[in-house]
Image: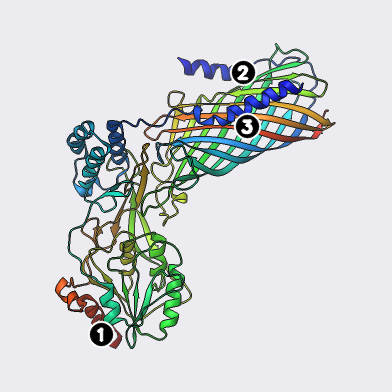
């Protein structure tokens, strides 16, 4: 029952008449460079039943176009670092070298209920996210293991933006994937299986609904205008993912970021 | 304004410090749960059930009660270790601190490096990276001993050894009692003897929850590499303790026209090893791939048979004689005369 409701809501969001339909498009394009530390915790039961975690730097480039009525945002980012075992708490063996990357496209339309200082938006998100894990074990005479989890997700997004000063805006958004294509090598991920990688096997792609894949991502940000056309954005990012299958995977990350957003053209 | 910002910063710092709490707790640490974790993991990942003709479900019925009744961690390790030994796989083991619960191959193997270096290869010396020892087993026959394939620098070590051995016309590569290591090192050695690209084996990985779920058969090739290729006759010496990545070397060498394998069959520990860990800190490992020789199929447990069979004996070794090495020398010299 849950699934049709969510899908209907997502489809409906794209049909909702935008507020102020008589307004001019007033197109604005912005490019942002987002950097900061990302605090990751993950448990890939293909690799280990133990949780691994740690801080890594992350980088994201965001390209956004917006009018009074809608917002489209493309985000491309990644992070890499070494995670330690929750069991040992140390960075010696065992440890995980992790790469996390994402490409996200988000479309949101302004809802009619918005007032002059507050914008409510509703829309959809399609995103491809991947996690690679090079696991170094503390087993006598052992090889390393390579593991991977890829997800292409689709789901609704809600967002709110509120001006709290003449040049300062608070923003928050929440995305809840309802459908996912999960790519998961059954055993070791060959390109990361450093020892004598064979040319065999590959990804298994499965369609997962919220029964098997639960996730959410939340972003909050405070944007302050430095000068016309340039903003400094302080942000907080939360992503949680849980995949229940014969190959369970759990991932959570929280990040704080600093971003410089530059207007490329369009209205002020 | 400062106070709310400081509050937000503090809350954010607290939140990001607790990222791990967003995941459910790690697996249970009680003894039956640990046993079940190992049994289920092996059930889902181990590649050689069919070859071993082992009924894994029945082994669960046998050992799960032992694990449930374990009065101590030692008892639990004994139960898990005994269950894993039933697979008769040298790559399968449980490691608890300094204790290893592994399958020991009891078949005889006779090799003593002291006899080789004392009587046959008096000028044996290590190569620059220390990965192998080399010298002369005769005026025009070189000798290379590779005790394992762990670390790096194997290819360059062999290049250096061949350069220093000068114009030897035949070579003996001794991998008896060689305990394996990384497959890329085996291949680095074999490529110094390859005349062209040749398929030397096929590999399949376990690729699904069913015991018969495998990836497609992938051919493995050995192709020429290195600063110097040795094109003269080569004897590769093997025995029942030549295991794992060492067997991949033998597999790659035996398809080359200049190579004769002399000695006893190899150990038959063919698969890639997947290490694992338990929430209580114990570790274990097992095989996740199935290798096939091009001519004879899977060689797990039975090993790769030599071209010329010589096992030797403890008495011969005690008398300072290495029968397999004598035969290898004869094989190489005969080939040099042809």
Q: Quadrant of residue B124?
A: bottom left
Alpha carbons under labels 2 and 3: distance apart? 16 Å
Q: Which residue is mark 1?
A: B334
Residue drawn at (28%, 64%) of the image = B242
Query: What label does residue A105 carry, if any?
Result: 3
Q: Secondary structure at mark 1?
A: helix
Residues behind callouts 1 and 2 on a single chain = no
Residue extending furthest left? B315
Look at the image and tell me in which quarter the N terminus of chain B lies: top right
Callout in the foreground (2, 3): 3
Alpha carbons under labels 3 and 1: distance apart? 71 Å
Residues behind callouts 2 and 3 on a single chain = yes
Using the image, name the chain to which the residue with label 3 belongs. Answer: A
Q: Secondary structure at mark 3?
A: strand
Residue A161 lies, in percent from the top left, at: 71, 20
Residues behind callouts 3 and 1 on a single chain = no
Q: Which residue is mark 2?
A: A13
Residue B272 lies, in percent from the top left, at: 34, 53
């Amino acid at each position: 029952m849950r699934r049709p409701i969510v899908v209907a809501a997502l489809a409906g969001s794209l049909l909702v008449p935008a507020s102020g339909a008589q307004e001019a498009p007033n197109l604005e394009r912005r490019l942002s460079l987002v950097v900061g530390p990302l605090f990751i915790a993950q448990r890939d039961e293909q690799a280990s039943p133990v949780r691994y975690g740690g801080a890594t730097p992350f980088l994201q480039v965001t390209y956004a176009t917006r009018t009074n009525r809608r917002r489209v945002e493309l985000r491309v980012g990644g992070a890499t670092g070494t995670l330690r075992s929750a069991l040992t708490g140390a960075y010696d063996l065992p440890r995980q070298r992790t790469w996390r990357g994402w490409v996200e496209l988000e479309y949101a339309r302004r809802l009619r209920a918005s007032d002059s200082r507050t914008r409510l938006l509703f829309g959809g998100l399609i995103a491809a996210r991947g996690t690679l894990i090079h696991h170094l074990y503390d087993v006598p005479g052992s090889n390393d293991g390579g593991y991977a989890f890829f997800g292409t997700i689709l789901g609704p997004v809600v967002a709110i933006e509120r001006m709290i000063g003449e040049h300062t805006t608070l923003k928050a958004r929440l995305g809840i994937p309802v459908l996912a294509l999960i790519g998961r090598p059954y055993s070791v991920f060959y390109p990361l299986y450093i020892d004598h990688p064979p040319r065999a096997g590959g990804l298994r792609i499965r369609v997962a609904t919220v029964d098997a894949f639960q996730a959410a991502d939340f972003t909050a940000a405070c944007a302050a205008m430095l000068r016309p056309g340039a903003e400094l954005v302080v942000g907080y990012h939360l992503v949680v993912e849980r995949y229940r299958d014969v190959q369970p995977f759990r991932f959570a990350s929280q990040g704080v970021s600093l971003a410089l957003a530059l207007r490329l053209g369009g209205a002020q | 304004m400062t106070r709310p910002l400081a509050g937000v910063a503090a809350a954010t710092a607290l939140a990001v410090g607790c990222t791990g709490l967003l995941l459910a707790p790690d697996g249970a640490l009680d003894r039956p749960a640990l046993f079940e974790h190992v049994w289920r993991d092996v059930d889902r990942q181990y590649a050689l059930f069919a070859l071993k003709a082992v009924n894994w479900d029945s082994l669960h019925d046998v050992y799960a009660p032992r694990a449930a009744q374990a009065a101590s961690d030692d008892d639990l390790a004994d139960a898990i270790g005994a269950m894993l030994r039933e697979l008769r796989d040298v790559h399968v083991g449980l490691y608890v601190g300094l204790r290893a619960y592994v399958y020991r191959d009891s078949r005889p193997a006779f090799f003593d490096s002291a006899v080789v270096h004392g009587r046959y290869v008096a000028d044996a010396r290590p190569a620059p990276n220390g990965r192998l020892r080399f010298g002369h087993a005769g005026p025009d026959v070189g000798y290379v001993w590779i005790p394992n394939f762990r670390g790096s620098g194997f290819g360059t070590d062999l290049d250096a050894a061949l350069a220093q051995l000068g114009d030897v016309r035949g070579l003996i590569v001794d991998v008896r009692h060689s305990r394996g290591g990384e497959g890329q090192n085996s291949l680095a050695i074999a490529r110094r003897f390859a005349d062209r690209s040749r398929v030397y084996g096929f590999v399949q990985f376990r690729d699904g929850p069913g015991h018969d779920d495998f990836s497609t058969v992938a051919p493995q090739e050995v192709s020429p590499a290195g600063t110097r290729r040795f094109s003269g006759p080569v004897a590769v010496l093997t025995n029942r303790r030549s295991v794992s990545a060492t067997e991949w070397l033998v597999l790659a060498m035996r398809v080359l026209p200049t190579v004769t394998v002399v000695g006893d069959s190899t150990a038959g520990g063919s698969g890639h090893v997947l290490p694992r860990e338990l929430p209580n800190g114990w570790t274990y490992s097992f095989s996740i791939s199935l290798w096939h020789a091009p001519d004879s199929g899977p060689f797990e447990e039975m090993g790769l048979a030599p071209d010329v069979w010589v096992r030797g004996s403890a008495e011969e070794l005690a008398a300072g004689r290495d029968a397999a090495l004598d035969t290898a020398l004869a094989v190489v010299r005969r080939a040099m005369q042809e």
